[in-house]
Amino acid sequence: TDEIMQQEIRPLVAVDIIEQLHRQFAILSGGRGKDGAPIITFPEFAGFSEIPDDDFLNVVTYLTSIPSLEAASIGFIIIIDRRRDKWSAVKASLTRIAGAFPGNLQLVFVLRPSRFIQRAIADIGIKLYRDDFKMKVPIIMLNSVSDLHGYIDKSQLTRELGGTLEYGHSQWIHHRTAIENFAMTVKTTAQMLQTFGTDLAETELPNDVQCTEELLSSHTDHHSKLKDELKLAVKQGATLLTCIREPVTRSANSKLSPDELENVATVERLLAQLDETEKAFDQFWTKHHLKLEQCLQLRHFEHDFREVKLTLDNLMETQAGFADIGDSVTRVENLLKEQKHLEEKGQEPLEKAQSLALHGEQLIQNNHYAVDSIRPKCVELRRICDDFTNETKKKYDILGKSLELHKQLDKASQWCEAGIYLLASQAVDKCQSQEGAETALVEIEKFLVTAKEHQLSNPKEFYNQFDMILTPEIKANAQRIVQKLEDVQEMFDKRQVSLKKLAAKQTRPVQPVAPHPESSPKRASPKITRPAAVGSSGNHTAQSPAPSSTNVGVYQIAHCMATSAEAKEVAGNGVMGHIINELIETERVYVEELQSIIEGYASEMDNPNLVHLIPSALQNKKEILFGNLPEIYNFHNRIFLKEIENCIENPELLARCFLKRKEDLQIYEKYCQNKPRSEALWRQCGDSIFFQECQRKLDHKLSLDAYLLKPVQRITKYQLLLKEMLKCSKNSEGTAELEEALATVLDIIKSVNDSMHQIAITGYEGDVSDLGKLLMQGSFNVWTDHKKGHNKVKDLARFKPMQRHLFLYTKMLLFCKKREENTDGHEKTASYSFKNSLKMSTVGITENVKGDNKKFEIWYNGREEVYIIQASSVELKNTWISEIRKVLTGQLEACR
């Protein structure tokens, strides 16, 4: 037990009574009696009786607290030196010591006054007052120090008492103060370490990387400071030990007194205590520091896990969104590309996930404290990676099957088309002879051999093979093609029966009848594409917004089948109904898409929560970006869709819908005229966060600009569907109305197209709206011939044509030069630079120019200026002449 540290028992330390100690009225020299009793000396002190009781008690109490408990228990020896004093001083000293000495007394030696009279008084006084001193120990009165040497060895007495013990009071006070300071330092340091250790033990580990890093840094800094404090304390103790041992170090003959030896033992004990405290603290710190470092590793792991998990979840969500298995070869091939792109996109996150899982397992192997938290996350990462890989393989398998299926369907469909074409191309007049019939039979038999190239001859086997991907739509499509195969096979069977009869016997001559012009292989209609040869790998792909390849195939088959009696049976009203269904279904989708654009984009521009996302260039420009799209939506949603839905039972009423709504459909012209301004604005603002947020909410795969093309695509699709209906209703009731409806839609498309060119005219100082209706526009080679011009110029002009784009209005003919410019890296945009104009009220035309049937002349002021114009074809030339003639005729009638 360290006595110095126990301030509860001995609260006094040297520094508390430093002034009283320096007065030196009592000293602990370090000497010992023969039995080891500590010696306290009261040297001669003139003002002993004037010392306050508290000061006396404090000093004596402090001195008795210094020796070890073992030495103190023997009892103290007190030497009172009063050789130069009076008996009264001896008496006062004994009385004070008797009343206030806190320790166990063994002997009291009094060096009595040396003067004769005082010595006599002392002898008498001691006898008279011995009992009054209340001391139960012998008081030995000594006449000289020599008498004292008989009781105590000289080596244990200071020089003042005739001994040899080295004692310096100032040095003694310095050592006591230093030892007690060091003890206090040791205690304070131990308390600081204990407090820090308690704080560390009670610290809750943070839940994020930054706070953990800050805590680790803070604790490490605090630990470093405490370690520095420890080093200073150890250095202080070592220095103090050297100071106490200094006499022995200085002289080999010197010996330390028992008190000094106790001081050495005390300092060594304190140093040992400091060393044990440091070791215990270091051991605790090592564990705590490891836990903090592991906590930081865990927080980094958890942070990386959250990031990787979010990326993987998004990847899985995207993959889950790829539910489409395609409805055509082209679509499936595109889906395979998309799947490949997704797989490539997923490589980096998957590698990160695998790397993170490996890192987590290394943490577990390194005995991380949070094994129960890390292991499930590693398992989760590997599970998601495996799920993505397995799902990707599954997608590839399904899409591979889908691709094979659609290729089989395409082959079967092409086979049907090729078969129908073969039947349609066998001229009836040539089959009337036996040789012609046999040739036709051979052609049919050769063709029927190719049926094995498609696998639809056994539908049950086909369905079993592709059962996993047969959606209702694909199954319906497959059933249609199977039905088509059966129909075509039936046509071949009937044709073979007929031809075999013709080949078996010579029939009476039949008036040769030329095949329908549209079915003749020599004069194939330009509207019909001859089916690909059987077994070819080419796929029929229709550009949007044409009908799907399947439907086009059906229309073409129906058209070809209409060239023979057998085909007419197959075509019928079914195909017409199919086209009507196609029109209504696509119209519904169109209306829904328009609604999504208006609600998901246009309306959101007024949403106060999204206003801050709208770029400044887009502010107050909603009408420029969307044009009259709301007007188009309202027309289709409230009127047109409902009217064409009423035609599902009566297809012949469809044409009337288009004729009835001819004026309403002119709204497309206004939309298309605004399109260049809309596209320019989109190029400027299309990559803004506002549009990305709207697209995300709508879950659209394509951005807004793709949807803003829908109206342009829709008006074009109408004419394609009407053309297909015309093919199926040749020479039947309602054909005339269909032709008129088609002409109406084509006229609208032409007006739209013309107006798109018209708004690109630059440099014309007037207002084009004052020039009347735009009737025609197109590019031509133009030569000029001016009577007033120089002959050389005239000759040169005739050989070098100018490229001019002409705009024919009811009041004016404009000559412009076409220019194509790149806009911000996008596709080229045409503009028309104004060059010249002719008033239609002052021009004449010459319809034919010698030497070239594609040329015609427009002249001005009695052929003062002649413009020779060369069209790209005779048909185009005739169209323009017809329109110009109408304008000129109209002017003549107006003059009458």
Image (spheres, rainbow, N blue to C red):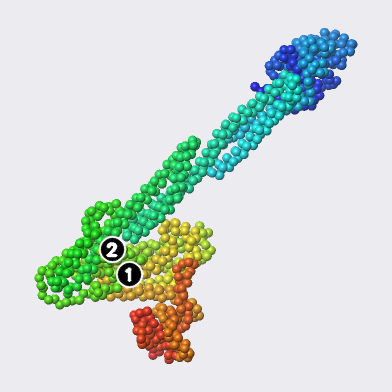
Residue 198 appears in the figure: no
| Nearer to the camera, 162 or 514 | 162
Q: Residue at x 38, y 73 (%)?
A: 749
The image shows residue 523 at horizontal and vertical percentages of: 26, 75
- Tag 1 secondary structure: helix
Above or below 221: residue 832: below
Residue 431 showing in the rendered view: yes
Query: In screen coordinates, is 335 left or right of 246?
Result: left
Q: Which residue is mark 2?
A: 536
Q: Determine the secondary structure under disc 2.
A: loop
Nearer to us: label 1 or label 2: 2
- Give the answer, above or below, for where 572 lies relative to 286: below
Where residue 490 appears, as percent x and y from the top left, is: 18, 63
Q: Quadrant of residue 139?
A: top right
Mark with earlier residue (1, 2)? 2
Residue drawn at (79%, 23%) of the image: 168
Tell whether 61 sits left or right of 694: right
Left or right relative to 1: residue 757: left
Total residue callouts = 2
How many C-alpha atoms fall within 10 Å of the one at disc 2: few (<14), some, or many (≥20)? Answer: few
- Left or right for 220, reference 888: right
Q: From what the image shows, is residue 571 above or below residue 399?
A: below
- Of all residues, the one furthest to the left in this rendering is 505
Q: Which residue is mark 1?
A: 720
Label 1 is placed on what type of residue?
Leu
Label 1 crowd (10 A; few <14 / some 14-19 / many >=20)? some
User: Residue 256 location in percent, x, y?
Assistant: 73, 20
